[in-house]
Structure formats: C-alpha cells, structure tokens
Amino acid sequence: METTEPIELQITERLKEAAPAQATLTLPFHQRQKSRLRTRLDDGEDVGLFLPRGLVLRHGDLLRATSGLVVEVRAAPEAVSTAYSDDPLLLARTAYHLGNRHVALQLGAGWLRYSQDHVLDRMVKELGLTVTSEEAPFEPEAGAYSTDDHNGHPH
C-alpha cells in the first residue's frame, strides 16, 4: 500500500493586503486554477495548497501558510501563441471566434494570447493575424462572472 507523507507547509489563504513576501511559488496557468495542489516553492520546499474552490491565482498574488509564511505567486512562462494585428476590429472578431470555442484569452494593446494550439493558430492566421509561438507567462481574462477579483487587487 502506497503512503504519502503529510505536507508540513500548508497554504490556506490569499491575502487581500500587501505584505512582504518571504518565498515565491512559480506555476503555469493550469496549476494556478487548482484549489488543492501538492507542489514546491521556488526554493524546493514541499507545499500544499488548500485554498477556497474557484480561486484562480494571479501573478503577484500573496498567499499565507498556516505557519505565517507569506508566499508571492509568479506566473511561469509556458507555451503560448500570441496573435498580433493593428486592426482593433480584426482583434475583436478573432477574440469572438476564440471565445465561441471557450478558449482562455489574455488581451493586450494590439495582441491576444492563448495556450498554444496548432489548430487555433491556423484559424487565427486565416482570419488575418500574425501568430508567434513563444514561451511567456499566461494571464487570461478572469471572465465577466468571475468571483476572482483580480482587477481590484492591490498589486
């Protein structure tokens, strides 16, 4: 029978106020969506996340462990596609088509970003955008009905 050792460092809270971070935790977006996760801090220490369900961690979020340790979340670089256009209508049209496919999108001035997918890349190129594959932190929009208050965040 397989047993796992208990995790001594448990993170249970996202801070709403600023505090000096004593450690960092770098995760890709798909792991920043998990409320229960066994992982490691950037210094290699084992840690368990025990956060409220539905919480999405964002780059710069501050977390507190039961020990009092304050941990800053960092968005890990990951495989993404970034599509560029100087035409705002074309960007909006592309975002609409990707949204119809329930694709998580990060938006910026003149560009949009999504998890790398060759089928989506082909569609976006056919719509007229220039697509670049790269490794970059991915911070998609939270969504209109999200309870994740990133916009009111103190960072």
Image: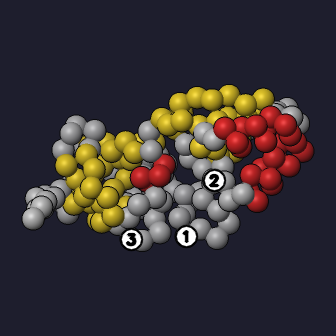
The residue identified by callout 1 is 147
Mark seen at residue 118:
none
The CA span between labels 3 and 2 is: 21 Å
The CA span between labels 3 and 1 is: 11 Å
Name the mark nearer the viewer: 3 or 2. Answer: 2
| Image coords of residue 120 (percent x, y) | 71, 43
Mark 2 lies on a secondary structure that is loop
Question: Disc 3 residue type?
Answer: Pro
Classify residue 110 by image quadrant. top right
The residue identified by callout 2 is 104
One can see residue 11 in this view: yes
Quick one: 142 or 70, which is closer to the camera? 142
Question: Disc 1 residue type?
Answer: Thr
| Image coords of residue 91 (percent x, y) | 82, 43
**CB under 8 Å between callouts 3 and 1?**
no
Write the residue at 76% across / 37% down.
122
| Image coords of residue 62 (percent x, y) | 37, 53
Write the residue at 60% across / 59% down.
142
- Check the picture and name the quadrant holding the N terminus: bottom left
Write the residue at 70% across / 42% down.
119
Q: How crowded is mark 3: few (under 14 residues within 10 Å), some or many (20 or more)?
A: few
Mark seen at residue 52:
3
Name the mark nearer the viewer: 1 or 2. Answer: 2
